[in-house]
């Protein structure tokens, strides 16, 4: 059996990225990461936040979004995820863990995906957290938020966008 050539492998990788219906790559140089937000979503700077946030079209007074934060943590990624899961359970009313699984991007980073529902500021939200090891002992968390009522419909959109997540050199 013939092995795939570099060009064929590149085509397969490129096809998977573009078939995901993602937009242009957004690079956060200070954070050392990049990803492609969903096509037609806006990247906006929010005062007080370190990185720009991807916002989708608003519905019922809420715009689905992808927000990335980083934090220094010297332990393992699994310990970091466990600590965050426990904090979320204590912090949010009506917290439900809808599932946790390993997650691999198309660009190398392996991480953990945690899907939750909870009530926040009077709204029931579905949030998917993608946890990754960053540079220099930092952990990166991409939080994808949507209203819970139709949030499952955005699961594929969020996953496709985060499949493009990369740690920048």
Image (cartoon, grey):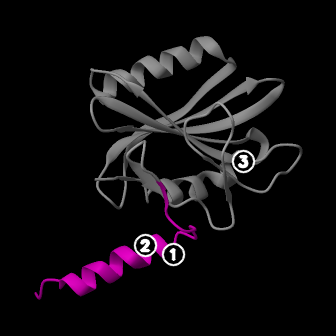
Mark 3 residue crowding within 10 angstroms, few (<14) / some (14–19) / many (20+): many
Q: Residue furthest top?
A: 90
Residue 144 location, x and y as percent? 60, 43
Residue 8 location, x and y as percent? 26, 85
- The residue drawn where x is 49% and y is 75% is 18
Question: Mark 1 near mark 2, Cβ–Cβ under 8 Å?
Answer: yes
Q: Mark 3 points at which residue?
A: 64
Total label count? 3
Give the camera-side residue of 154 and 109.
109
Q: State yes or no: residue 18 in magenta.
A: yes
- The residue drawn where x is 56% and y is 67% is 22
Q: Is mark 3 on a helix, strand or loop?
A: loop
Q: What element carries label 2?
A: helix
Q: In this view, does 150 lie above or below 128?
A: below
Q: Residue 19, labelled with which disc?
A: 1
Q: With 155 as the anchor, is 17 left or right in this view?
A: left
User: How far apart are labels 3 and 1 at the CA level?
Assistant: 21 Å
Q: Residue 16, labelled with which disc?
A: 2
Mark 1 residue crowding within 10 angstroms, few (<14) / some (14–19) / many (20+): few
Q: Give the range drawn in magenta.
A: 1-27
- Location of residue 105 by image quarter: bottom left
- The residue drawn where x is 51% and y is 61% is 36
Give the camera-side residue of 26 and 159.
26
Residue 95 location, x and y as percent? 65, 21
Residue 96 location, x and y as percent? 62, 25
């Amino acid at each position: 059996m013939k092995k795939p050539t570099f060009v064929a492998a590149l085509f397969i990788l490129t096809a998977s990225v573009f078939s995901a219906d993602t937009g242009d790559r957004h690079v956060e140089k200070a954070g050392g990461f990049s990803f492609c937000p969903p096509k037609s979503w806006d990247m906006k700077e929010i005062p007080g936040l370190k990185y720009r946030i991807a916002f989708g079209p608003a519905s019922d007074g809420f715009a689905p979004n992808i927000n990335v934060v980083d934090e220094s943590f010297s332990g393992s990624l699994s310990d970091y995820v466990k600590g965050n899961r426990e904090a979320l359970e204590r912090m949010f009313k009506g917290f439900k863990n809808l599932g946790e699984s390993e997650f691999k991007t198309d660009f190398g980073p392996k991480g953990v995906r945690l899907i939750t529902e909870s009530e926040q500021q009077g709204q029931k939200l579905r949030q998917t957290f993608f946890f990754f090891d960053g540079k220099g002992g930092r952990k990166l968390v991409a939080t994808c938020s949507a209203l819970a009522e139709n949030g499952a419909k955005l699961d594929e959109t969020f996953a496709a966008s985060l499949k493009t997540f990369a740690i920048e050199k």
